[in-house]
């Protein structure tokens, strides 16, 4: 389709409209030279001819009046450059941490890089994919794409209705040229037969009367261009659907302890993001209870290096959707739960030890499972924070670790295995103003103990509270901490993107189009029959000529031409004298390899 | 559970495969070297012939191959053209290979070709036993990805060149990179056979997505080899034409390597081949992208999240799209398009190495 481009950028050079308004030999520089030559020679010959009836040229005049900028934008060169820019612009998005992907890492990077980090930040290097420059590139690309599709679509639709182009006057230079002399053959029948046979092979055909001969001109493979258009249109579709999804999707995170439930409403989420057009009323009203969470790990005694690696995670949930019975399902990694209008994904897990804190006055100030945050080691050493603002006389914070298989040694408390072999709590208790009234929102899983006073023992060092399930600890000031048991929790993402399936559909249509566009051979075939060879006698020597022309790599074309010629000849009774192709006939490069 | 015995067989098979590839590489390289040697001799002979003619030497010159045991000695009685067939190589091997007359003994190239066939079989056995040992697909970490995709490269190359014997001359340039990747895998990336982590379980998409990614990668490697040869061949051809135009009767360019190139298909043929490989590769990358997105959606609840691995697959896809475009764009055809294809390959390599090992993302479970 270089022609299409050429049409727009260099109108005067492009003279051949009837042959093919959207593609030229340009696009197959790699093809066997002979065929490429003949394609262009065809153009040269056809060029000066005024355009005829059915095959109206594309409205070059219309587009020619279009503004220079528009033509620049929609040219192949610009598309190419924008594509390359797009690739280059995406690179920093993988080299620098992205806020949308990993905010913590981004903050860390900013901290470590000071001024340089700030400059990068202003330039959008931490939000590459929503930065103005990245957006500008892809928006320009898609404007260019649309500007490119529309005229090509018109041209192609017209071409679909047009007849195959006129048979070239000299066929000798085309692929697989075959000339057969058939004495006593019936020219009409031959031509008729040729046409039928080509039609059956899904060629569009046209009979032409010429000065001293008649011919059938046949064409096949317009599907190639159809596929190409389909591909590009679907790309626009993909983009539109992605944008639609951005506006209407939502995604929320929840953490549920075994035995607890969740019902789908905004207030229940730990965090929640949604598109501009999202309406909270769209949240499907489903509920579930996490009945059990199971985890399996590589056991001791197996492959050394992998002890403690996770083997599987499973969450049993009892789901209730409106109008349906309660239903127990098992969620796994890669096995989300789909309910109408939402999907729920198992994305994390951890331990929630049940801890009771009683203040010196005897009031229970904290009770029940506490969600702990795994620190990322194999053993699932998890951080625990309990804030007890109601404790008196002073607000109290309990901080420390939960250890599924605990060891306390010179490295401090840590866990050596992720499963509950020897669960332990290792805690310290701090008192002071928790700062919860300051109005600044706080992370429930963190507390700043530097402003608090640890409860110390007789030797003046903080008391380390070390507990196994069922145990409790009385601190010197009268605070009591008891470890009542352990539950697990699971973290889920609930998400929905109403356009998702349309993104997929567009993408699949795009590949479909792509495959057509790359692999459907586009070719022309000509059959010419001329009666009598000069002698003027009524002997009726019929000369049959067959040749073809491919638009791209098409190794079977020559064979197909020869087969057709033979078939036509065989259908006639007369003896035949077959010439081998004249010396200037297109050699079939693609086959030379097998000759060795 | 992991079958340790099978896992060891697999490791052994891969090591032996590497050894066989080394031998095959030597064979291919020897073949190339001998070609260029022979070419050099031909030219020399032809030049001497000219001089002799000029000196009106009446005796026919007999050129016997010095160290080859003199299986053939040619009497030079015609022009340079007819002399060339009979001149035996001084390298001492009967390396008329694919192009020359059959001499009975096996040519270095045939030897190398058969050897690489055997090596590839063993390679596939290695990959298959790894799969059997772990009872899953053999592409869950970089070691497995590398061994599997190089097996695909070799299989594709062998299949391509069974029919088109002239492509066998590319053997050095295919076995070389394959060997390099295998060595990297064997030394840097090797990990013991193990079961899948949960993030890779329960999904068909691991089979589909990664299988296609492997094919795509393999095709990208092959495509890059062909595109490189195309670029070199194009330069070489131009230089030769210039020299011929400048009146040189026996134009020489790039010495021995030039002779090697003379034996390869023309740059136009290579361009066509490169395009065919890359268009299939592009379709595979498109599927990799789509299936990856489906899998990401099943696993993480979003089909696209600009994770570094996703970013790089996107970059690869865009570059190859640019390549296909360039082929149809005035002023970018040919060499510049081939340059883009190579840029795509660089992105593939980057994605495969740096992104897997250094850049931290969701995909970094890849086992390192
Ligand atoms: C969103 C960005 C784009 C992508 C990813 C893309 C991708 C592709 C690919 C992969 C091909 C090769 C398939 C084939 O040969 O049919 C192709 C061909 C083509 N594209 Fe695009 N394209 C994009 C934008 C554009 C734009 C903006 C234009 C208009 C200037 C355009 C015009 C064409 C044409 C005319 C062809 C046919 C080339 C030929 O004859 O082989 N594309 N495109």
Image (spheres, coloured by chain):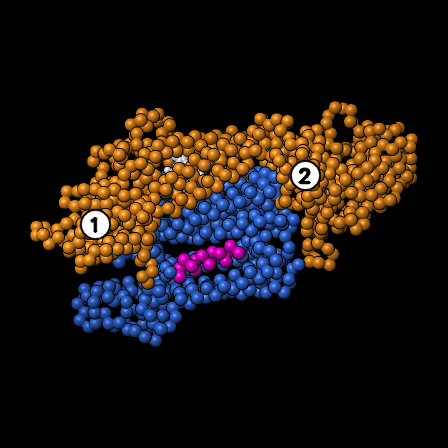
Chain colours: A orange, B blue
Residue B135: give x, y in percent of width and height.
Answer: 61, 58
Location of the C terminus of chain A (image quadrant): bottom left
Q: Which element type, helix, strand or loop, lies under badge 2?
A: strand
Q: Residues within 10 Å of mark 2 (few under 14, many from 20)?
A: many
Read off the residue under disc 1: A189
Question: Looking at the figure, which quarter contains the N terminus of chain A?
Answer: top left
In depth, the one of A112 and A206 nearer the eye is A206
Q: CA distance from mark 2 to mark 1?
A: 74 Å
Q: What residue is at 64 percent from the left and 55 percent from the top?
A: B195
Majority SS type along the magenta span: helix
Could you say whether the residue bearing mark 1 is in a helix, strand or loop?
A: helix
Was residue A69 drawn as part of the magenta stretch in this picture? no
Residue A197 in percent (x, y) is at 28, 49
Q: Is residue A6 left or right of residue A121?
A: left
Note whether A232 is above or below B249 in the view shown: above
Q: Which residue is mark 2?
A: A492
Indicate which label's residue lies in the foreground, 2 or 1: 1
Q: Residue at x 52, y 31 (%)?
A: A243
Ligand 1 falls in quadrant:
top left
Q: Which residues are magenta?
A: B148-162
Q: Is B14 situated above or below B207? A: below
Residue A249 horizontal/vertical position (percent)? 59, 32
Question: Residue at left 28%, top 62%?
Answer: B43
Q: Check whether the beta carbons of the residues at disc 2 and disc 1 lie within 8 A of each other.
A: no
């Amino acid at each position: 389709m270089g022609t299409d481009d050429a049409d727009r950028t260099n109108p005067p050079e492009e003279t051949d409209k009837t042959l093919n308004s959207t593609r030229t030999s340009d696009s197959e520089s790699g093809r066997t030279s002979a065929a490429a030559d003949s394609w262009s020679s065809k153009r040269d010959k056809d060029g000066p001819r005024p355009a005829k009836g059915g095959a109206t040229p594309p409205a070059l005049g219309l587009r020619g009046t279009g503004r220079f900028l528009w033509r620049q934008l929609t040219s192949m060169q610009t598309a190419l450059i924008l594509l390359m820019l797009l690739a280059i612009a995406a690179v920093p998005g993988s080299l620098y941490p992205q806020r949308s992907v990993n905010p913590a890492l981004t903050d860390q990077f900013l901290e470590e890089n000071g001024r340089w980090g700030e400059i990068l930040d202003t330039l959008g290097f931490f939000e590459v994919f929503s930065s103005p420059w990245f957006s500008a590139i892809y928006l320009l690309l898609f404007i260019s794409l649309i500007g490119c599709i529309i005229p090509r679509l018109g041209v192609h639709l017209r071409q679909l209705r047009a007849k195959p182009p006129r048979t070239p006057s000299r066929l000798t230079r085309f692929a697989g040229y075959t000339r057969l002399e058939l004495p006593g053959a019936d020219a009409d029948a031959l031509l008729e037969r040729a046409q039928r046979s080509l039609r059956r092979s899904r060629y569009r055909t046209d009979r032409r009367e010429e000065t001293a001969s008649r011919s059938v001109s046949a064409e096949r493979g317009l599907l190639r261009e159809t596929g190409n258009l389909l591909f590009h249109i679907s790309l626009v579709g993909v983009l539109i659907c992605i944008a639609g999804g951005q506006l209407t999707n939502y995604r929320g995170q929840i953490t549920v302890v075994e035995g607890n439930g969740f019902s789908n409403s905004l207030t229940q989420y730990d965090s929640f993001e949604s598109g501009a057009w999202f309406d909270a009323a769209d949240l499907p009203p489903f509920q579930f209870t996490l009945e059990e969470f199971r985890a399996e790990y590589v056991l001791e005694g197996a492959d050394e290096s992998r002890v403690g690696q996770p083997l599987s995670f499973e969450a049993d949930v009892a789901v209730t959707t409106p109008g349906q019975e309660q239903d127990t399902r098992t969620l796994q990694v890669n096995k989300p739960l789909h309910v109408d209008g939402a999907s729920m994904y198992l994305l994390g897990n951890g331990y929630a030890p049940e801890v009771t804190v009683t203040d010196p006055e005897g009031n229970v100030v904290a009770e029940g499972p506490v969600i702990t945050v795994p620190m990322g080691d194999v053993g699932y050493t998890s951080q625990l924070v309990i804030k007890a603002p109601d404790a008196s006389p002073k607000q109290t914070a309990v901080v420390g670790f939960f250890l599924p298989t605990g060891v306390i040694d010179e490295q401090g408390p840590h866990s050596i295995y992720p499963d509950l072999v020897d669960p332990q709590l290792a805690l310290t208790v701090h008192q002071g103003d928790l700062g919860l009234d300051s109005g600044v929102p706080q992370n429930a899983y963190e507390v700043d103990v530097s402003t608090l006073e640890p409860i110390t023992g007789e030797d003046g060092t903080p008391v380390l509270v070390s507990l196994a399930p069922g145990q409790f600890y009385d601190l010197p000031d009268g605070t009591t901490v008891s470890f009542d048991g352990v539950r697990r929790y699971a973290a889920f993402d609930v998400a929905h993107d109403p356009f998702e399936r349309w993104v997929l559909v567009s993408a699949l249509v795009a590949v479909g189009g792509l495959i057509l566009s790359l692999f459907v051979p586009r070719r022309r075939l000509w059959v010419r029959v001329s009666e009598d060879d000069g002698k003027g006698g009524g002997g009726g020597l019929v000369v049959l000529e067959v040749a073809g022309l491919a638009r791209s790599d098409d190794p079977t074309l020559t064979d197909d031409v020869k087969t057709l010629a033979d078939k036509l000849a065989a259908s006639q009774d007369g003896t035949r004298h077959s010439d081998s192709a004249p010396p200037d006939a297109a050699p079939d490069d693609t086959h030379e390899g097998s000759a060795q | 559970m992991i079958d340790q015995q099978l896992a060891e067989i697999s490791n052994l098979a891969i090591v032996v495969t590497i050894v066989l590839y080394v031998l095959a590489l030597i064979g291919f390289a020897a073949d190339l070297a001998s070609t260029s040697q022979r070419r050099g001799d031909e030219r020399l002979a032809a030049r001497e012939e000219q001089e002799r003619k000029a000196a009106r030497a009446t005796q026919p010159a007999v050129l016997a191959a010095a160290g080859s045991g003199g299986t053939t000695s040619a009497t030079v009685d015609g022009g340079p053209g007819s002399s060339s067939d009979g001149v035996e190589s001084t390298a001492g091997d009967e390396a008329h290979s694919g192009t020359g007359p059959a001499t009975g003994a096996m040519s270095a190239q045939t030897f190398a070709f058969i050897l690489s066939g055997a090596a590839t079989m063993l390679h596939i056995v290695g990959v298959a036993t790894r799969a059997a040992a772990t009872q899953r697909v053999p592409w869950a970490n970089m070691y497995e990805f590398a061994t599997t995709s190089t097996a695909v490269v070799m299989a594709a190359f062998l299949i391509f060149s069974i029919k088109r014997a002239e492509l066998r001359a590319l053997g050095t340039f295919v076995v070389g990179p394959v060997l390099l990747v295998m060595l990297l895998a064997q030394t840097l990336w090797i990990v013991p056979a193990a079961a899948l982590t949960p993030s890779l379980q329960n999904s068909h998409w691991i089979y589909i997505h990664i299988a296609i990614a492997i094919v795509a990668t393999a095709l990208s490697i092959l495509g890059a080899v062909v595109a490189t040869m195309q670029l070199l061949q194009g330069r070489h051809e131009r230089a030769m034409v210039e020299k011929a135009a400048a009146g040189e009767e026996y134009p020489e360019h790039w010495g021995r390597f030039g002779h090697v190139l003379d034996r390869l298909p023309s740059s136009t043929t290579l361009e066509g081949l490169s395009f065919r490989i890359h268009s299939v590769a592009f379709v595979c990358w498109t599927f990799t992208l789509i299936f990856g997105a489906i899998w990401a959606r099943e696993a993480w609840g979003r089909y696209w999240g600009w994770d570094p691995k996703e970013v790089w697959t996107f970059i690869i896809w865009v570059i190859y799209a640019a390549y296909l475009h360039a082929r149809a764009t005035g002023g970018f055809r040919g060499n510049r398009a081939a340059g883009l294809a190579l840029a795509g390959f660089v992105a593939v390599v980057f994605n495969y190495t740096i992104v897997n090992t250094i850049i931290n993302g969701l995909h970094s479970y890849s086992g390192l």
